Image (cartoon, helix red, strand yellow):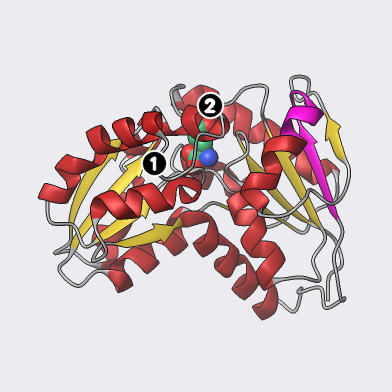
């Protein structure tokens, strides 16, 4: 058993959808969450910038003595994370492996949709991973850059006019492609899964990348004998912008009150 905390990070609040699953699947784990709220969104930035931010995020979590780091961010996961993951003394992984496997096992007709930030769609990492598992699969992709600001602004209710308009613009054409599985390629999107699912139709399965990464983490810790088996873990949150704003919105993402301290940190010099 390894009682060190798990580190989870994202550009902003989206990674909390992964944290929620970690809490459910591994209640005994301590969790340290880092949301780079001062620099969100990452999704429109260059690969070099995303990778530099990712190094700083990982470096911060390692300074808190974590036993594993989950990049609960589709953008980081698809923009070079795997090239740097081996540089660290603890397992560091993103959402793409577990998600590609889940999508391939969910699809019946081999037509898989992927929505994400501009940087995630540009990267083509999912294409490579899905085709390695299922060479006959067809992948249909769409960058949805407006979803992250809409979610960060809390406009997530099903029927919310701005969300409805934007979601229809993005998704209707993907419905015509006949996909039966849709990867929510950004960890912010589970918050608007109700609207996405309604527009796509009930026959389309939605894959939640943060949930898949949490399940992968549980397998990893269990197989390595590192799962913390205490009754309840402790949580702490770090952000790079206002801690008050974070606490308010984080409640929506976690589906419960933020338990544990929220502190502001600066990553620039790390
Ligand atoms: N949650 C991040 C992702 O999965 C947010 C994207 C962003 O910062 O643009 O891609």
Q: Position of residue 188 (x, y in %)?
A: 51, 43
Image quadrant in which the N terminus is located: bottom right
Q: What label sits on residue 159 in the rendered view?
A: 1
Q: Position of residue 209 (x, y in %)?
A: 47, 55
**The residue at label 2 has a CB less than 8 Å from ligand 1:** yes
Q: Is residue 238 left or right of residue 170?
A: right
Foreground: 237 or 122?
237
Mark 2 neighbour class, 10 Å CA radius: few under 14, some 14 to 19, many 20 or more: some
Q: Position of residue 208 (x, y in %)?
A: 45, 58
Foreground: 38 or 77?
38
Q: Which residue is mark 2?
A: 41
Foreground: 41 or 121?
41
Q: Is residue 119 visible?
A: no
Mark 1 neighbour class, 10 Å CA radius: few under 14, some 14 to 19, many 20 or more: few
Q: Earlier in the sequence, mark 2 or mark 1?
A: 2
Mark 2 vs mark 1, foreground winner is: 1
Residues shaded magenta: 235-246
């Amino acid at each position: 058993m390894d009682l060190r905390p798990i580190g989870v990070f994202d550009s902003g609040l989206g990674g909390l959808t992964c944290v929620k699953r970690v809490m459910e699947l591994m209640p005994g784990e301590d969790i340290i969450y880092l949301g780079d709220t001062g620099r969100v969104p990452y999704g429109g930035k260059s690969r070099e910038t995303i990778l530099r931010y990712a190094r700083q995020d990982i470096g911060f979590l390692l300074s808190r003595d974590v036993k594993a780091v989950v990049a609960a961010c589709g953008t980081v996961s698809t923009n070079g994370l795997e090239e740097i993951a081996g540089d660290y003394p603890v397992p560091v992984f993103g959402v793409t492996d577990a998600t590609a496997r889940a999508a391939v096992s969910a699809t019946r007709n081999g037509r898989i949709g992927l929505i994400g930030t501009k940087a995630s769609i540009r990267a083509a990492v999912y294409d490579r991973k899905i085709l390695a598992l299922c060479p006959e699969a067809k992948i249909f992709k769409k960058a949805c850059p407006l979803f992250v600001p809409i979610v960060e602004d809390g406009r997530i209710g099903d029927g919310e006019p701005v969300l409805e308009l934007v979601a229809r613009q993005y998704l209707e054409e993907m419905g015509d492609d006949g996909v039966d599985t849709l990867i929510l390629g950004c960890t912010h999107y589970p918050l608007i899964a109700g609207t996405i699912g309604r527009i796509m139709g009930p026959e389309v399965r939605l894959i939640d990348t943060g949930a898949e990464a949490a399940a992968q983490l549980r397998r990893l810790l269990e197989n390595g004998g590192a799962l913390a088996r205490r009754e309840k873990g402790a949580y702490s949150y770090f952000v790079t912008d206002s801690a008050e704003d974070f606490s308010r919105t984080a409640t929506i993402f976690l589906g419960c009150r933020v338990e544990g301290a929220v502190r502001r940190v600066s990553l620039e010099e790390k």
